[in-house]
């Protein structure tokens, strides 16, 4: 258990390089199970979730060697059952079910269950596996799937969600199966494009990943490859929120603006100057923050994962803002903590109404999840006095060296055990 002590009032200034994307690294690592050859991945972030995925791969039989930001995997499948302790720790462990099914036609993976940001079932994944020809039983808390043979299918996803995880698991299960699989309303997040680029290097045949109809043509075998993970756009967005919040001037590097179009427009609307560079984004704020309305939506809409930090920014804006969360059904839990810092936020179901206040006051607050924790730190950076964000280990799931990077931008932040 650790917490972060944040002193408010310093303007953040300078450049920060974001780490490799968490939500890109996790499926790419799972996809290594699709080959027998060596896989080399560069630019992985050293965060708890990546370590958990590596533990899952090792449990299944893979040999893993990690040096600095590069990992070398010798993929082997000696077991087809993932352990509950690991899947419980991280829902994305469920990503191994697709490649296990695709490769050895058998997967036994615990059902991940609910989590603090919402109920988050895996029914879409299971339905898709069945459409690909797998027999799936739910027994003793496990999803047990097997197939004599998988075949291509046409899978329709609900356009309201364009489920990221389901898109990933269908791709991973179908790249080695016979025939063609079409995913309608597929997610087209940058992390999906990164996974497709990785799978292409392995020899897979995938088309349409920048559109909502993604087509996978099964191939007989996949080879090893070498890949660089893209930068983490949510981490980038978090530092931009911190800059906006403190009236600072921050450049996030390893962060192409084309992956953050909607966020950039929202930062401008809230009163920031944003400069788009080739692989970097610079944000400056000199004047007051303005209120705005915001709805989270599947990519390219505003990302739910940045919603909490953006609400922190809006808590100090002039006027009233309305933020609607449409992806996860319980992602406003941190609002009660923000209120303890003096924010004026009222929540009605999945909508938050934020009336900007002139000042926030530091307070002890508790992070309920990764993005909630980041949002409370962002708020603390612009609050009067000291904020202690408890349960900081949530932040370690997705942010590499969070306090170090913020400190280098001038923040007063330290980790306390
Ligand atoms: N859903 C179902 N059934 C399913 C799958 C999804 O009802 O079988 C619902 C979910 O409950 C949710 C919605 O569909 O309400 C969208 O879920 P999606 O499948 O898109 O989310 P995910 O794959 O579980 C990933 C990210 C999340 C991010 C969401 C949305 C990873 C490892 N996780 O989750 O990231 O919020 O997409 O963009 O990629 C985070 O990084 O903090 C995080 C939570």
Image: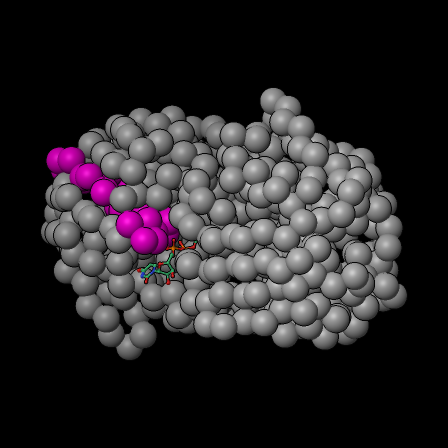
Q: Name above or below for residue 28 compared with residue 217.
A: below
For the N terminus, the quadrant is: bottom right
Q: Is residue 385 visible?
A: yes
Q: Is residue 93 visible?
A: no
At a point 26% along the width and 36% down the height, the residue shown is: 214
Q: Between residues 35 and 378, which one lies in front from this camera angle?
A: 378
Residue that sits furthest to the top in the current view: 278
Q: Is residue 112 toward the left or the right of residue 204 in the image?
A: right
Q: Is residue 152 toward the left or the right of residue 16 in the image?
A: left
At a point 72% along the width and 46% down the height, the residue shown is: 244
Residue that sits furthest to the bottom in the current view: 140
Task: State the image coordinates of residue 232 (x, y, percent, origin top left).
Answer: 57, 41
Task: State the image coordinates of residue 127 (x, y, percent, origin top left).
Answer: 20, 58
**Quarter of the render that holds ligand 1:** bottom left
Here the colouring is one colour
For the C terminus, the quadrant is: bottom right
Q: Is residue 71 toward the left or the right of residue 161 in the image?
A: right
Q: How many marks?
A: 0
Please check the rendered image and state whether residue 173 is part of the magenta-colored stretch, yes or no.
Answer: yes
Please check the rendered image and state whether residue 11 is part of the magenta-colored stretch, yes or no.
Answer: no
Q: Between residues 180 and 310, which one lies in front from this camera angle?
A: 310
At a point 28% along the width and 30% down the height, the residue shown is: 208
Q: Name above or below for residue 93 compared with residue 189.
A: below
Task: State the image coordinates of residue 33 (x, y, percent, origin top left).
Answer: 36, 44
Residue interval drawn in magenta: 159-184
Q: Name above or below for residue 272 compared with residue 336.
A: above
């Amino acid at each position: 258990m650790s917490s972060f002590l944040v002193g408010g009032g310093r303007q953040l200034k300078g450049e920060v390089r974001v780490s490799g994307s968490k939500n890109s690294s996790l499926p790419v690592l799972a996809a290594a199970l699709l080959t027998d050859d060596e896989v080399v991945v560069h630019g992985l972030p050293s965060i708890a979730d990546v370590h958990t995925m590596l533990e899952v791969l090792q449990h299944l039989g893979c040999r893993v060697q990690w040096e600095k930001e590069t990992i070398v995997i010798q993929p082997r499948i000696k077991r087809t059952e993932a352990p509950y302790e690991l899947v419980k720790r991280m829902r994305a462990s469920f990503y191994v079910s697709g490649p296990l099914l695709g490769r050895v036609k058998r997967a036994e993976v615990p059902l991940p269950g609910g989590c603090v940001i919402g109920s988050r079932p895996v029914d879409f994944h299971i339905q898709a596996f069945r459409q690909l020809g797998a027999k799936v039983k739910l027994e003793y808390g496990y999803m047990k799937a097997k197939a004599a043979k998988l075949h291509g299918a046409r899978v329709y996803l609900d356009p309201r969600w364009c489920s990221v995880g389901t898109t990933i698991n269908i791709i991973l299960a179908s790249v080695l199966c016979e025939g063609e699989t079409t995913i309608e309303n597929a997610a087209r997040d940058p992390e999906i494009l990164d996974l497709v680029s990785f799978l292409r290097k392995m020899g897979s045949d995938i088309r349409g990943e920048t559109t909502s109809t993604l087509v996978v043509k099964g191939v007989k075998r996949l080879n090893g490859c070498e890949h660089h993970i893209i930068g983490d756009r949510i981490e980038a967005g978090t530092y931009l929120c911190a800059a906006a919040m403190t009236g600072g001037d921050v450049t996030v590097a390893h962060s192409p603006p084309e992956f953050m179009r909607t966020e950039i427009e929202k930062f401008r609307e809230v009163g920031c100057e944003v400069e788009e560079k080739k692989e970097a984004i610079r944000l400056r704020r000199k004047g007051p923050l303005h209120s705005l309305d915001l709805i989270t939506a599947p990519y390219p809409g505003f990302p739910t994962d940045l919603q909490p930090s953006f609400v922190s920014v809006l808590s100090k804006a002039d006027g009233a803002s309305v933020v609607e969360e449409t992806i996860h059904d319980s992602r406003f839990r941190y609002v009660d903590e923000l209120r303890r810092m003096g924010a004026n936020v009222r929540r009605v179901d999945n909508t938050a109404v934020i009336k900007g206040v002139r000042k926030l006051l530091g307070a002890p607050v508790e992070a309920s999840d990764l993005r909630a924790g980041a949002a409370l730190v962002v708020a603390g950076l612009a609050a009067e006095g000291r904020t202690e964000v408890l349960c900081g280990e949530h932040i370690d799931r997705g942010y590499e060296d969070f306090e170090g990077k913020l400190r280098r931008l001038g923040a007063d932040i330290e980790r306390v055990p």
